[in-house]
Image: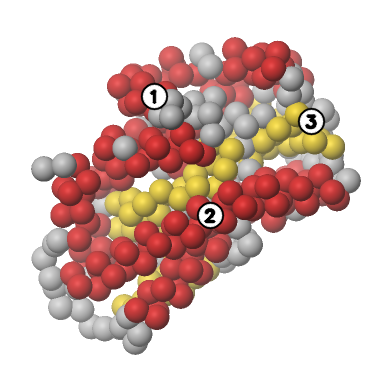
């Protein structure tokens, strides 16, 4: 059986238990509504409630109103929240495999990441947390990450000794250590204040997060490094998913797939829009790298791959590298 058919069978076919309708899906996330994830979640609510009126209700909680990124998955396992879309960098507690998405300079762009995510190996990763009680229902894009800082950070030696906030990922920690910087794992909701009070010197993020959370207003320098990917996994708990009556589960999954497609279109549009809004604001200076500056970053960060190749699997890394070929 082809892997996609097999996954569809696991995702859609399961014992039907009776459910005291209506079902409420609490969808918790940490970003603003005017972002790819914020828009995807609202589209998902709209589609599900239109297609299953009175049967399924979706409550979306943006901006870490319900749970922060440090607590949401534990809350999901306990049944206090039913869906979330954490960045792939925040899942290492549940599987080593998804750390592949954090390797610096792995994907040349979002299209390459998408080819990998849609491939058989990429689809198989959706089930990599199943033994921990979580399943991935689909990938969602945000964009490529840029570096923001108090001082210009244009070549790797500029990062030396600076404190950078990172998501909870050992790969990201190794990436900053590779340029002699000091990485600090902190929840997204704390980043603005940490930057504003200068408790940290910089951070890495996408244009839409830098704009929507106003990081650019407290970070005078942004370097357009595109050094890594920030994408998401829409996650639910195995227990919740399998308890949904089969016919409703199919409608929910189809609605989610359509909402993700919509969110991915927004990701491309917001990336361009928010870069321009930041550039036009004149508040922070944007540096673009020359080829030789970029090469310096690649040479400094690329050794991180070897450090994690046993944990992630070199076959998986090779497959991701292949996805850069059209
Ligand atoms: C997100 O986009 O969900 C947050 C990313 C971050 O923690 O930097």
Residue drawn at x 25%, y 73% is: 248
- In the image, 138 versus 79, the foreground residue is 138
Residue drawn at x 32%, y 68% is: 252
The residue indicated by pointer 2 is 265
Q: Are marks 2 and 1 in contact (CB under 8 Å)?
A: no
Can residue 125 be seen here? The reply is no
* Left or right position of 45 against 15: right
- In the image, 132 versus 155, the foreground residue is 155
* Left or right position of 280 against 315: right
The residue indicated by pointer 3 is 287
In space, the residues marked 2 and 1 are separated at their CA atoms by 24 Å
Q: Are marks 3 and 1 in contact (CB under 8 Å)?
A: no
In space, the residues marked 3 and 1 are separated at their CA atoms by 29 Å
In space, the residues marked 2 and 3 are separated at their CA atoms by 26 Å
Say which quadrant the N terminus sits in. Answer: top left
- Using the image, determine if residue 85 lies above or below residue 311: below
Residue 222 drawn at (x, y percent): 76, 36
The residue indicated by pointer 1 is 322
Disc nearest the viewer among 3 and 1? 1
Residue 118 drawn at (x, y percent): 35, 42
């Amino acid at each position: 059986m082809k892997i996609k058919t097999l996954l569809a069978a696991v995702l859609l076919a399961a014992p039907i238990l009776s459910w005291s309708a209506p079902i409420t899906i609490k969808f918790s996330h940490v970003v603003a509504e005017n972002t790819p994830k914020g828009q995807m979640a609202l589209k998902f609510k709209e589609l599900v409630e239109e297609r299953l009126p009175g049967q399924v209700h979706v409550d979306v909680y943006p901006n870490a109103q319900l749970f922060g990124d440090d607590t949401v998955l534990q809350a999901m396992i306990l049944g206090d929240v039913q869906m979330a879309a954490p960045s792939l960098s925040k899942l290492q507690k549940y599987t080593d495999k998804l750390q592949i998405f954090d390797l610096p300079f792995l994907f040349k762009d979002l299209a390459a990441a998408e080819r990998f995510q849609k491939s058989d190996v990429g689809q198989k990763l959706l089930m990599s947390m199943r033994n921990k009680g979580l399943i991935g229902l689909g990938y969602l894009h945000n964009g490529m990450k840029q570096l923001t800082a108090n001082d210009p950070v244009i070549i790797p030696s500029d990062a030396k000794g600076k404190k950078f906030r990172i998501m909870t990922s050992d790969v990201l920690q190794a990436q900053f250590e590779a340029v002699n910087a000091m990485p600090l794992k902190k929840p997204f909701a704390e980043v603005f204040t940490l930057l504003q009070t200068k408790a940290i010197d910089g951070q890495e993020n996408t244009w839409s997060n830098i704009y929507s959370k106003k990081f650019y207003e407290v970070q005078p320098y942004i370097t357009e490094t595109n050094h890594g990917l920030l994408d998401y996994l829409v996650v639910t708990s195995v227990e919740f998913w399998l308890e949904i009556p089969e016919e409703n589960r199919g409608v929910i999954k189809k609605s989610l797939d359509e909402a993700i497609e919509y969110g991915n279109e927004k990701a491309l549009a917001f990336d361009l829009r928010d870069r321009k809004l930041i550039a036009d604001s004149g508040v922070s200076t944007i540096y673009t790298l020359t080829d030789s500056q970029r090469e310096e970053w690649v040479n400094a960060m690329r050794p991180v791959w070897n450090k994690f190749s046993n944990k992630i699997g070199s076959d998986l890394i090779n497959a991701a590298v292949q996805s850069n070929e059209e």
